[in-house]
Image (spheres, rainbow, N blue to C red):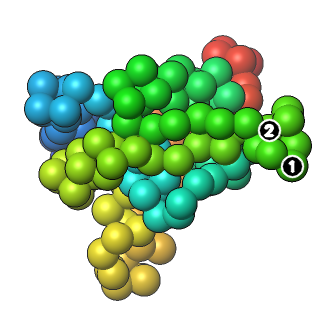
Amino acid sequence: MQLQALSVTVAWVRLQRAVDAFEADLKARHGITALQLDVLRILGERPQLPLAALRKALVMHPATLGQAIDGLRRKDLCQVRRNPDDRRARDIAITPEGARIVSEAPLAGPVRLREINHDPARLDRLAAAMEDAIDLFGLEPWLEGRKSGE
């Protein structure tokens, strides 16, 4: 095995452990997932947002996003209302309790990149490395929109 391959494996395991620990801490302290925190952070940027725009911003399957929003709504962290101009559309807004959680939760994970300025060249390298990881780890068949094992 190449020494570099071992280094990448160690880095991958460290990243997975850090993400898992962050998720567990969020769940224990605030009762939400990292995805739900991401949703709340985006909702906190506007008075309300169409559900379709939120889904587009997060590049996510409607059912996955729907489950996250339902959990937030049940905890009174967001409100979902019909759009008065288009009865088929839904608008989502953060509640004061949701805003409180956003203010208390640590700023970690990919959403941190939107909040803190970083060297653009470093971000370009990170994006390229993430794309390389998908390819080198053989994960392309499981990208959203593709059936596993295709």
Q: Is residue 35 visible?
A: no
In the image, residue 18 lies at what x, y percent? 16, 40
Q: Position of residue 83 (x, y in %)?
A: 76, 43
Element on which disc 1 rests: loop
* Quarter of the figure that contains the C terminus: top right
Left/right placement of residue 9 relative to residue 113 reads left
**Which one is nearer the viewer's eye here, 144 or 46?**
46
| Of residues 24 and 100, the one drawn nearer to the viewer in this rendering | 100
Q: In the rendered view of the protein, which quadrant contains the N terminus?
A: top left
Q: Nearer the viewer, residue 64 or 132?
A: 64
**Local SS, label 2:** strand
Q: Is residue 26 left or right of residue 150?
A: left
Nearer to us in this view, 145 or 73: 73
Amino acid bearing label 1:
Asp
How packed mark 1 is, by other alpha carbons closer than 10 Å (few <14, some 14-19, many 20 or more), is: few
Q: Residue at x 80, y 38 (%)?
A: 89
Q: Picture coordinates of residue 70 (x, y %)?
A: 51, 22
Q: Furthest residue to the front? A: 84
> Contact (CB < 8 A) between labels 1 and 2?
yes
Label 2: how many Cα within 10 Å (few below 14, some 14–19, many 20+): few
Q: CA gap, disc 1 to disc 2?
A: 8 Å
**From the viewer's perspective, is residue 14 above or below residue 145?**
below
Q: Which tag is nearer the camera, tag 1 or tag 2?
A: 1
Q: Residue at x 72, y 26 (%)?
A: 146
Where residue 128 appears, as percent x and y from the top left, is 50, 63
- Identify the residue position indicated by label 2 in the image: 89
Name the residue: 64% across, 16% down.
148
Q: Which residue is mark 1?
A: 85
Three-letter code, disc 2: Ala
Judged left or right of residue 40, residue 61 is right
Residue 141: quarter of image: top right
